[in-house]
Image (cartoon, helix red, strand yellow):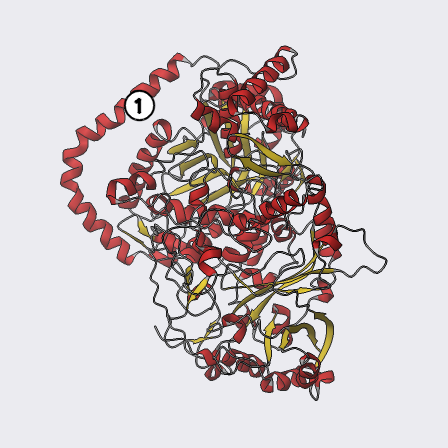
């Protein structure tokens, strides 16, 4: 299988060029929130391995919070530009492809950033400015863009065939229906109207790293366990102390901020979400968060690789990235549905998980024992999230109109159409996918 | 936690006033501030107190944000209302997109509810047979013409408990926990579907399903007219503008009754049995008697009453129909209330619960796509308008003088975003609801295009033991003609609102 990878390039913006940069990025869109896939700056549509990409200006609205909550001086961080992308294959190949297909546009963009001069080695410069995510999630490990498009075409062909021959299929048992559809699909493949490519070989180096990671993390945990056990009473004491005193900062976001975000949303069945904030000051929260994300990343690499992150099936790709020496964090995801339903799904299904991670964020609604309450303070949680959200200047989705569930269903349809050894029960379930 | 003072709640929250067969909705603009205030001060607003005999007339009053401004309500008070109410139903393109108010539904085509046609005040008038005209005269009273300009007087029709297409309407309503006895799990581990819903989901100032108080304007004792208001239960010392009030959603929906029946008749090849079957599948209930398409639960469901026909009509969930072969996933009532608990499969014990919490243990591909319907319930208070057509009449071509019919849809909820808007957006209009694709609500859907999708106009009917039946090319049957978000104040808050701006 071809694994997915991501990049997170972040570079400080030259203050005097910030406005130019915003204009330049806006010129890639046909309307706010709607990128032109063929835009001359970065023609995302030409990248055959790219799932999602975005440019977002990391402008933290909440820098005063640290003063309000902890009396510590406000720190003025440099305004930054982030390029975030999820793709098939490895990052080196993707950077090289970027340099090949979008050199001029990227030079224009990065010229607005500190330390970039035209003619620099683009791939190297991007690599130098990358921040590896502390945790990254992929909805379905190994599902490539090519596979997504092929499987969608297959489903649509089957769908049209079924509609054309509805009376004929109406009386068919699943086994007969499957056989007829399989014959139809085979003839379509033979005629070259649809393609179903073989799975690509798994890169050996990746496989090796995967195995090492799979075994390494539990091994390290095992080795550390006596220490962790000894430390746990102290941890609980430290945690409870902080949970009692940490201040909540979750006022309702102002209408202007709200509008600047919502006008970018709901132009597709999938949406982008970019947010940033400060981590609560002190080493305790920072290390706790780093440890937790290390575990989250483990589960995302080895357990949650088939269509759901805990109970949430609507996230395509997501990542948590530390920046500024682990003082701040960026979270970026691609999810199905509107933000309101995303947040409700989150609260009701994985509230504990949100608390675990975002509970270490400055101003987050009060948690209890790390996982309880917090996000269940529904309105405060929603305000908190929205207030920390950033307008995503440019957002590209290679498969608009397809939810993560659509992709899963299409894959299951494809798997079934290629098989001729299914049991009656399996056939029944397969037919129900159509 | 104090008991509900029914004398401070408008009657419409507790009663549908169904025995008053006549009704109309007056959409008003405030013409003269002080005349309007003095009218409001003496308005005979109906409360939620039970009386014997029941009243023969009723009046309910609600305001838009523009209405509160026209009453000179201070900005800090208005800012305390929800963002959806402040912006309004039609003033934000993104909201219109999400609510499905695009294309033919677009606010640009509305008869009222946009720009200068946003009403300030809504009066709901109800009366027993033959008494509406005189009740309206009484309400208008003296100084009426000074106080208000009437944008519209929207009539209603009594269609005998059926809506304009002919389905029995209003069968399922949440049971409000007036006694505040319910204490649901805060951390979302309700294992069984319940029809009893916390009072705070329908009235501001009380605890909601998260055991929290929904945001609403609270003011200090030193602020103008504060003494008119009750205290906030959760913030002693502050006065609660919202307590015993709520948000009221109004949508003016015209229904293409002929189009509806003629479409399904064609799909049924003019076979009457098939016609009623298909129409029933689209609605999610049997056409003739409103009974459930899925088998009833053996076990009682909390809040589904033991009196009358309720258990026969409502004692069901869709857990007994995971493959959708009794009631299609996309059927209107299955979209509008999927009837599920916080966790699927009623897990027993720590391990089973943990497995579910971590997202495992699903048996079917669609399992757990939707959960926790208790946070997305609304109280419906709509009334029909226009002329009722029988199915036989609807199958005939339209005559020369066609009378429009439809529904004045009303929903009561304390959180517009999480209740009405969520149901409308994520469940009814969304073409991807419950793992489906290319279809929106068979009754309400606008069939508007979705980028990346070839069509959005189908209705799938899963079949046991064979390939699903799929009806293609559903037209739009229901068109939005107007709408607004209102604040329906408590009685004391109404007095406050008519005084605060003076």
Compared to residue A48, the image places residue B227 above or below, namely: below
Q: Quadrant of the N terminus of chain A?
A: top left
Q: Nearer the viewer, residue B154 or B258?
A: B258
Give x and y (percent) for residue A321.
Answer: 41, 36
Give x and y (percent) for residue B117.
Answer: 72, 66
Compared to residue A109, the image places residue B343 above or below, namely: below
| Residue B410 quadrant | bottom right
* Residue found at the very far bottom of the displayed protein: B142
| Residue B402 quadrant | bottom right
**Residue under mark 1: which chain is it in?**
A
Mark 1 residue crowding within 10 angstroms, few (<14) / some (14–19) / many (20+): some
Give x and y (percent) for residue B433.
Answer: 54, 42
> Is residue A303 among the parts visible in the rendering?
yes
Q: Quadrant of the C terminus of chain A?
A: top right
Q: Nearer the viewer, residue B152 or B161?
A: B161
Give x and y (percent) for residue B386.
Answer: 73, 64
Q: Nearer the viewer, residue A108 or A260?
A: A260
* Numbered disc total: 1
> Is residue A80 among the parts visible in the rendering?
no
Tell me what residue is drawn at x 47 percent, y 79 percent.
B50
Report which residue position mark 1 lands on: A213
Where disc 1 sits, the SS reads: helix
Q: Is residue A288 left or right of residue A142?
A: left
């Amino acid at each position: 299988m071809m694994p997915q990878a991501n990049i997170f390039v972040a570079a400080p913006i030259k203050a005097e060029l910030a406005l130019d940069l915003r204009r330049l990025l806006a010129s890639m869109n046909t309307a706010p929130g709607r990128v032109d896939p063929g835009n001359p700056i970065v023609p995302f549509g030409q990248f055959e391995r790219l799932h999602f990409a975005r440019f977002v200006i990391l402008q933290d609205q909440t820098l005063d919070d640290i003063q309000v909550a902890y009396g510590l001086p406000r720190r003025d961080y440099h305004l930054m530009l982030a390029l975030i992308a999820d793709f098939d294959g490895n990052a080196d190949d993707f950077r090289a492809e970027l340099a090949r297909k979008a050199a001029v546009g990227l030079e224009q963009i990065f010229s607005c950033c500190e330390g970039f001069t035209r003619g620099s080695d683009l791939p190297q410069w991007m690599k130098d400015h990358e921040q590896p995510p502390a945790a990254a999630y992929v909805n379905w490990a190994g599902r490539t863009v090519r596979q997504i498009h092929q499987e969608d075409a297959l489903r649509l062909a089957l769908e049209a065939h079924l509609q054309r021959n509805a009376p004929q299929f109406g009386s068919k048992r699943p086994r007969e229906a499957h056989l007829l559809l399989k014959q139809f699909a085979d003839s379509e493949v033979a005629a070259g109207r649809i393609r179903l490519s073989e799975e690509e070989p798994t890169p050996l180096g990746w496989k090796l790293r995967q195995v090492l990671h799979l075994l390494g993390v539990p091994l390290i945990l095992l080795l550390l366990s006596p220490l962790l056990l000894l430390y746990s009473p102290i941890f609980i004491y430290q945690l409870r102390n902080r949970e009692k005193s940490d201040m909540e900062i979750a006022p309702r976001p102002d209408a202007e901020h709200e509008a600047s975000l919502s006008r970018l949303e709901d132009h597709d069945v999938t949406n982008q979400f970019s947010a940033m904030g400060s981590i609560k000051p002190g080493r305790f929260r920072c290390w706790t968060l780093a440890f937790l994300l290390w575990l989250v990343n483990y589960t995302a690499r080895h357990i949650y690789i088939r269509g759901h992150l805990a109970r949430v099936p609507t996230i395509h790709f997501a990542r948590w990235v530390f920046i500024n020496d682990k003082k701040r964090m960026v979270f970026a995801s691609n999810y199905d549905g509107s933000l309101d339903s995303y947040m409700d799904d989150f609260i009701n299904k994985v509230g504990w998980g949100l608390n675990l991670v975002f509970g270490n964020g400055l101003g987050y609604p009060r948690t209890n024992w790390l996982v309880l309450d917090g996000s269940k303070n529904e309105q405060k949680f929603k305000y908190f999230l929205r207030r920390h959200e950033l307008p995503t200047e440019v957002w590209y989705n290679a498969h608009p109109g397809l939810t993560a569930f659509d992709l899963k269903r299409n894959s299951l349809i494809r798997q079934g159409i290629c098989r001729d050894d299914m049991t009656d029960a399996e056939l029944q379930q397969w037919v129900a996918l159509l | 936690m104090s008991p509900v003072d029914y004398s401070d709640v408008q009657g419409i929250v507790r009663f549908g006033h169904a025995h008053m067969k006549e009704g109309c909705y007056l959409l008003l603009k405030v013409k003269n501030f002080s005349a309007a205030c003095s009218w409001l001060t003496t308005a005979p607003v109906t409360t939620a107190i039970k009386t014997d005999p029941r009243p023969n007339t009723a009046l309910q009053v609600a305001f838009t944000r523009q209405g509160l401004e026209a009453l000179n309500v201070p900005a800090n008070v208005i800012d305390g209302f929800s963002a959806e109410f402040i912006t309004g139903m039609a003033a934000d393109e993104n909201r219109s997109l999400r609510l499905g108010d695009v294309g033919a539904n677009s606010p640009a085509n509305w008869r009222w509810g946009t720009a200068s046609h946003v009403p300030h005040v809504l009066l709901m008038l109800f009366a027993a047979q033959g008494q509406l005209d005189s009740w309206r005269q009484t309400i208008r009273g003296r100084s009426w013409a000074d106080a208000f300009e009437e944008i519209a007087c929207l009539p209603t029709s009594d269609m005998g408990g059926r809506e304009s297409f002919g389905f029995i309407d209003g069968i399922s309503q949440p049971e409000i926990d007036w006694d505040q006895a319910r204490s649901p799990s805060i951390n979302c581990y309700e294992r069984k579907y319940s029809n009893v819903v916390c009072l705070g989901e329908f009235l501001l100032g009380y605890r909601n399903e998260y055991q929290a108080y929904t945001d609403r304007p609270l003011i200090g004792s030193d602020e103008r007219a504060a003494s008119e208001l009750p205290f906030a239960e959760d913030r002693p010392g502050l006065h609660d503008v919202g307590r015993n009030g709520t948000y009221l959603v109004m949508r003016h929906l015209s229904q293409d009754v002929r189009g509806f029946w003629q479409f399904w008749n064609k799909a049924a090849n003019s076979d009457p049995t098939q016609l009623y079957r298909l129409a029933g599948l689209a609605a999610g209930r049997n056409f003739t008697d409103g009974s459930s398409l899925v088998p009833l639960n053996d076990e009682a469901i909390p809040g589904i009453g033991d009196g009358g026909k309720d258990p026969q009509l409502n004692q069901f969930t869709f857990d007994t129909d995971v493959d959708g072969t009794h009631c299609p996933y996309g059927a209107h009532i299955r979209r509008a209330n999927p009837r599920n608990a916080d966790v699927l499969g009623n897990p027993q014990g720590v391990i089973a619960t943990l497995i579910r919490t971590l997202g495992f243990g699903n048996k079917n591909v669609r399992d757990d796509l939707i959960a926790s319907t208790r946070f997305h319930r609304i109280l419906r208070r709509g009334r029909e308008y226009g002329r009722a057509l029988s199915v036989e009449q609807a199958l005939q071509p339209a005559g020369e003088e066609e009378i429009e019919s439809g529904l004045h849809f009303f929903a009561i909820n304390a959180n517009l975003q999480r209740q009405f808007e969520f149901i409308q957006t994520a469940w009814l209009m969304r073409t991807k609801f419950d793992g489906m694709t290319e279809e929106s609500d068979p009754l309400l859907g606008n069939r508007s295009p979705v980028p990346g999708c070839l069509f959005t106009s189908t209705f799938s009917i899963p079949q046991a033991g064979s390939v699903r039946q799929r009806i293609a090319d559903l037209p739009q049957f229901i068109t939005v003609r107007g709408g607004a978000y209102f604040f329906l104040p408590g009685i004391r808050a109404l007095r406050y609102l008519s005084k605060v701006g003076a």
